[in-house]
Amino acid sequence: MPAYYISRLVVAREAAGRGLGYRILDWVQAAAFAKGWRYVRLAASKDNPGLRRYYEKAGFMHVGDPEDARWPTSLYERYR
């Protein structure tokens, strides 16, 4: 299944609280879907509950925590 992977999404501290991160995620998803990608996926630190809540609030579904990852990782995806 075609998937677009997001990595290293960062918003400048002075732009925090304006919803820019959510808008970037929506823009990436729209662009990926327009190109025929069915899924948008990302990985987050399993040990960062705030970040995990952020992605879940953005509509990403938690799909697993791989046991063989180099660091504690949670995998997420949004799909059409």
Image (cartoon, helix red, strand yellow):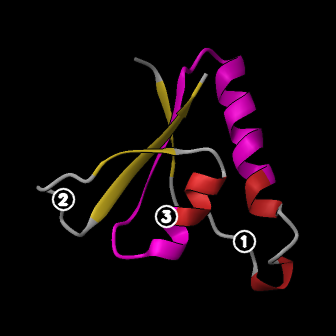
- Magenta span has 41? yes
Q: Note whether 11 is above or below 25 in the view shown.
A: below
Mark 3 is on which residue type? Answer: Arg
The label on residue 11 is 1
Image: magenta residue range = 23-52
Identify the residue position indicated by label 2 in the image: 69
Quarter of the image that includes the N terminus: top left
The image quadrant that residue 32 belongs to is top right
> In whole angstroms, how far apart are the C-alphas of marks 1 and 3?
16 Å
> In whole angstroms, how far apart are the C-alphas of marks 1 and 2?
26 Å
Residue 31 vs residue 51: left or right?
right
The label on residue 52 is 3
Q: Residues within 10 Å of mark 1 (few under 14, many from 20)?
A: few
Residue 31 vs residue 72: left or right?
right
Q: Note whether 43 is above or below 78 in the view shown.
A: below
Mark 1 is on which residue type? Answer: Val
Q: Earlier in the sequence, mark 1 or mark 2?
A: 1
Q: Note whether 25 is above or below 52 in the view shown.
A: above
Give the residue displayed 44% in from the left and 46% down from the top. 76
Residue 63 vs residue 4: left or right?
left
Give the residue displayed 55% in from the left and 45% down from the top. 60
Residue lying furthest left: 68
